[in-house]
Amino acid sequence: MDKIKILLVDDHAVVRSGLMMLMNAQTDMEVVGEAADGNEGINKALELKPDVVLMDLSMPHGKDGFSATAELKKAMPHLSVLILTMHDDDEYLFRGLKAGASGYILKSAPSQELLHAIRTVRKGEAYLYPTATKRLIEGYLNFAEKEEQDSLDLLSSREKEVLSFVALGYSNKEIADKLVISVKTVENHKAKIMEKLQLTTRPQLVKFAIKKGLLDLDE
């Protein structure tokens, strides 16, 4: 049976040493490399092609675990990243999941639970530490909703007006006439709206506008 190839990314050498001893003692695991920060972790992962990256989040030097995870998942979509951190904090978890992590476990967890988490994410499954799963799922939904609401705040008043008319089906020329601006200005507003909201199609704009209640314009 092939061993699970693991890359350790943590800024504390003592922590990496302890993890290496634990994992290399398993018949189905092998630590193939280690890194002290996110930048080094990315380079090692691209070089060594591990099955699982055990990623710390708070690394004061170089790239942090959130950014490193996001870059790794973009470059290696099938790679499993398991966050191992001291932070028992909802926001840290949500940011880790958003970055693409397959799992999240605390450094205070028992060794056997950590080993179970590694085997779980290696199989392509998600892992969250058991005592917090329900709380974290509920919190993540609230976090995602708040983040989406915050995205509306990125738009200026004029951009919200343009978005509303777009959602109502008006053409660029009709929007220009209503707002007494040029068609080119309307096109520029639409481009900025799509960039700020990270949307690429008109149907996506319409859906966003409806969800945010932007169609109640007095005409």
Image (cartoon, grey):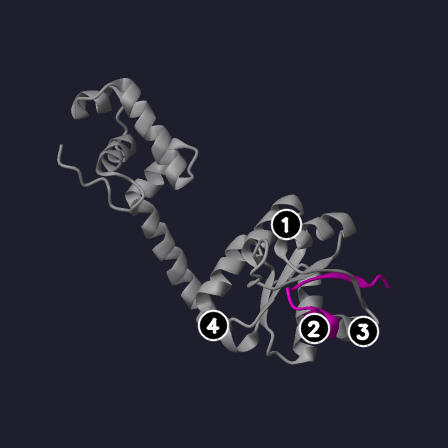
Q: Is residue 78 left or right of residue 128?
A: right
Q: Nearer the viewer, mark 2 or mark 3?
A: 2
Q: Nearer the viewer, residue 161 or 47?
A: 47
Q: Are marks 2 and 3 in contact (CB under 8 Å)?
A: no
User: Please, what is the three-letter code of the amino acid marked with disc 3?
Assistant: Gln
Q: Disc 1 versus disc 2: distance between alpha carbons?
A: 24 Å
- The label on residue 14 is 2
Magenta segment boundaries in residue numbering: 1-18
Query: Which dot, 4 or 2, sits closer to the camera?
Result: 2
Alpha carbon separation for disc pair 4 and 2: 33 Å
User: Of helix, strand and loop, which one carries label 3?
Assistant: loop
* x 40%, y 35%: residue: 195
Amino acid of disc 4: Lys
Determine which residue is flagged by label 1: 72
Whole-angstrom CA distance, mark 3 to mark 1, is 26 Å
Q: In front: mark 1 or mark 2?
A: 2
Point out the tag, 4 or 3, that comes first from the N-terminus.
Answer: 3
Foreground label between 3 and 1: 1
